[in-house]
Image: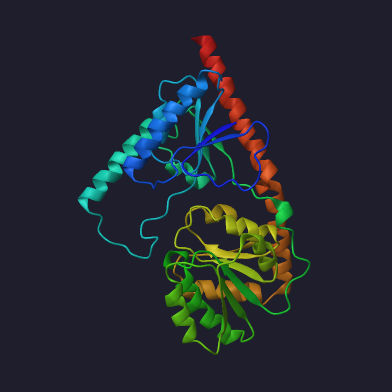
């Protein structure tokens, strides 16, 4: 496996057979830097191809528009993805008129994406909702495969018991579009019914200072701000709480929800983006974005019943084991590769 990347942070020795190439040590995602990366990737591919016969090329998530076009005309079949659903319009909490120049730029990007996808032999989507990212989903010749994001279940064992004190965990970037202010409003109503309930807010972000000010105005409520949490501490933190809540305005795909489900937690989230694919009625509740009353009602329903928490937790753990375990995701990816390679060989034979 040969990996071309913009920047690389290697924390342990690479396994045999894996080769990594850092093409842009100092870069951002500007158009110029992407063009430079594309040129360097083409030159790298040409150099490696002198001694290696590549079977397949895979541009992984995020699928920057147009990037793989630098390899147009090369022999190996191309796989793109996985694609996740888009952020919904207004997901940042601000709905405004889209300028003509912005719309023109988006049209150009969409056109480029159609050309890019037309060159691909395989397109990977993380969930059924992500089909919206495929420009021509019914076009013949391109295979579409659902390959879910997977997590390492050994790092996220289920909790032993439901916590005695009702508690809600928010673990995400502390920014408005994650629904943090909707959650603060909802928690005021939860605490009015359940005064011993606690809300723990973990993570950093651009709106953290405003959240801190808001929490300071609510001294009677049990709200704890943890700031940034080390990734190694996330599983233990999740298992300490009754329910995980992510009231995002339109999350494309939330790995944190899968992690909470693996730990055996019920989940309360929003009916937006890719979240409905992850959260079922048997494992949690979905409410409309920005719905303070609906969010409060869903949290109170779950926090008020240990039996419901246990049942939802068991369901979520079982679902992650069956659908989202890392090895399952790898198997699905390998199946997609085999299918693409089989189609490429059949095409070559027919030619």
Chosen colour scheme: rainbow
Residue that sits furthest to the left in the current view: 100
- Seen at 43% across and 41% down, the residue is 24
Relative image position of residue 271 (x, y in whole percent): 50, 60
Residue 119 seen in this snapshot? no
Q: How many marks?
A: 0
Depicted 178 relative to depicted 303: above or below: above
Depicted 91 relative to depicted 20: above or below: below
Q: Which image quarter holds the N terminus?
A: top right
Depicted 113 relative to depicted 49: above or below: below
Toward which corner of the image does residue 314 lie, by quadrant? bottom right
Depicted 119 relative to depicted 100: above or below: above
- Seen at 24% across and 44% down, the residue is 104
Identify which residue, 311 or 13, lies in the foreground: 13
Residue that sits furthest to the bottom in the current view: 220
Identify which residue, 235 or 262, lies in the foreground: 235
Residue 287 seen in this snapshot? yes
Relative image position of residue 317 (x, y in whole percent): 71, 57
Q: Does residue 6 appear to the left or right of 191 in the view shown?
A: left
- Seen at 71% across and 55% down, the residue is 155
Q: Does residue 162 appear to the left or right of 284 in the view shown?
A: right
Relative image position of residue 118 (x, y in whole percent): 41, 29
Relative image position of residue 3 (x, y in whole percent): 54, 35
Toward which corner of the image does residue 202 lie, by quadrant? bottom right
């Amino acid at each position: 496996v040969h990996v071309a990347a913009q920047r690389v942070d290697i924390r342990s020795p690479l396994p045999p057979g894996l080769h990594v190439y850092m093409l842009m040590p100092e870069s951002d995602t500007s158009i110029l830097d992407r063009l430079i990366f594309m040129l360097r990737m083409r030159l790298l591919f040409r150099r490696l191809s002198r001694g290696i016969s590549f079977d397949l090329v895979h541009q992984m998530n995020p699928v920057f528009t147009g990037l793989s076009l630098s390899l147009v005309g090369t022999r190996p079949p191309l796989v793109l993805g996985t694609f996740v659903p888009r952020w919904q319009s207004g997901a940042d909490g601000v709905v405004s008129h889209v300028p003509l120049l912005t719309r023109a730029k988006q049209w150009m990007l969409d056109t480029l994406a159609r050309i890019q996808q037309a060159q691909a032999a395989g397109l990977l989507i993380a969930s059924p909702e992500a089909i919206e990212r495929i420009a021509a989903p019914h076009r013949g010749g391109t295979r579409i495969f659902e390959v879910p994001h997977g997590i390492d279940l050994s790092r996220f064992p289920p909790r032993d018991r439901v916590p005695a004190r009702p508690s809600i965990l928010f673990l995400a970037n502390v920014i408005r579009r994650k629904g943090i202010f909707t959650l603060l409003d909802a928690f005021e109503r939860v605490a009015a019914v359940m005064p011993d309930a606690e809300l723990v807010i973990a993570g950093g972000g651009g709106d953290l200072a405003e959240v801190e000010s808001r929490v300071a105005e609510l001294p009677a409520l049990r709200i704890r701000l943890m700031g940034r949490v080390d990734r190694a501490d996330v599983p233990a933190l999740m298992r300490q709480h009754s329910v995980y809540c992510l009231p995002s305005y339109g999350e494309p795909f939330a790995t944190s929800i899968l992690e909470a489900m693996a730990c055996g937690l019920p989940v309360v989230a929003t009916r937006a983006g890719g979240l409905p694919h992850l959260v079922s009625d048997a494992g949690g509740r979905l409410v409309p974005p920005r719905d303070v009353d609906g969010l409060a009602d869903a949290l109170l329903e779950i926090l008020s019943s240990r039996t419901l928490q246990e049942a939802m937790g068991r369901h979520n753990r079982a679902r992650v084991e069956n659908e989202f375990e890392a090895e399952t995701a790898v198997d699905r990816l390998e199946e997609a590769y085999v299918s693409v390679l089989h189609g490429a060989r059949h095409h070559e034979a027919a030619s």
